[in-house]
Amino acid sequence: MAKSTNRFFQFVGTSKNVRSGQLWYPAADVYQTPDGWVVKVELAGVSPEDIEIDIQGNVLSIAGCRKDRSCGEGVSFQQMEISYSNFEKTLKFPASIDGAKVEHIFENGLLIITLSKAK
């Protein structure tokens, strides 16, 4: 599964690529493991090709956009509670994560990133 979705993720050189407009901030869990870190980000409805991941020093930045792909022309809404716009999540770690081995999968609406310590 990871191999098929890895091609959709982009590693950007700088976090200056943040989009303007109304942002939403997804929930995230961070776990420290003996080998590094595991980060889970709740991104229901986001396509893997709409996600960017950036690492600078001790900061992991995740940005992208959730788009409403289910409605076409001529559709009006009765109620809208889900945010369809740009999002970003910035997580600071206690030490540099530059050079960490990064693996990620997108599963059931969760982006799971594994950061393994450089050896």
Image (tube, rainbow, N blue to C red):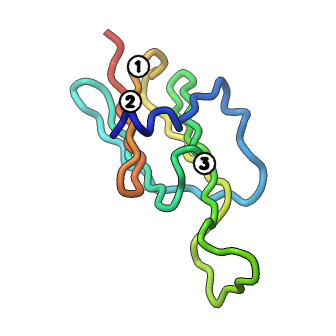
* Towards the viewer: 96 or 89: 89
Circle 2: is it few (<14), some (14-19), or many (20+) Cα within 10 Å? Answer: some
Q: Which mark is residue 100?
A: 1
Mark toward the start of the polypeptide (2 vs 3): 3
Give the spatial CA distance, label 3 vs label 1. 21 Å
Q: Is residue 6 above or below residue 50?
A: above
For this orientation, the residue located farthest to the top is 119
Tell me what residue is drawn at x 33 percent, y 37 percent. 38
- Residue 85 lies in quadrant: bottom right
Between the residue at mark 2 and the residue at mark 3, the CA separation in whole angstroms equals 19 Å
Residue at image point 57% right, 56% down: 25
Q: Quadrant of residue 101?
A: top left
Query: Which label was assigned to residue 88?
Result: 3
Q: CA distance from mark 2 to mark 1?
A: 10 Å
Q: Position of residue 11 (x, y in %)?
A: 57, 28
Determine whether, in the image, residue 118 is placed left or right of residue 67: left
Label 1 SS: loop
Give the residue at mark 2. 103
Helix, strand or loop status at disc 3: strand
Q: Quick check: 114 above or below 100? A: below
Amino acid marked by disc 1: Ala
Q: Residues within 10 Å of mark 3 (few under 14, many from 20)?
A: some
- Residue occupying the far bottom of the picture: 78
Residue drawn at point x = 47 percent, y = 60 percent: 44
User: Do residues under tags 3 and 1 come within 8 Å of each other at their CB atoms?
Assistant: no
Q: Are marks 2 and 1 in contact (CB under 8 Å)?
A: no
Mark 2: amino acid: Glu
Badge 3 or badge 1: first in the primary sequence: 3
Report helix, strand or loop for mark 2: strand
Give amino acid for label 3.
Answer: Glu
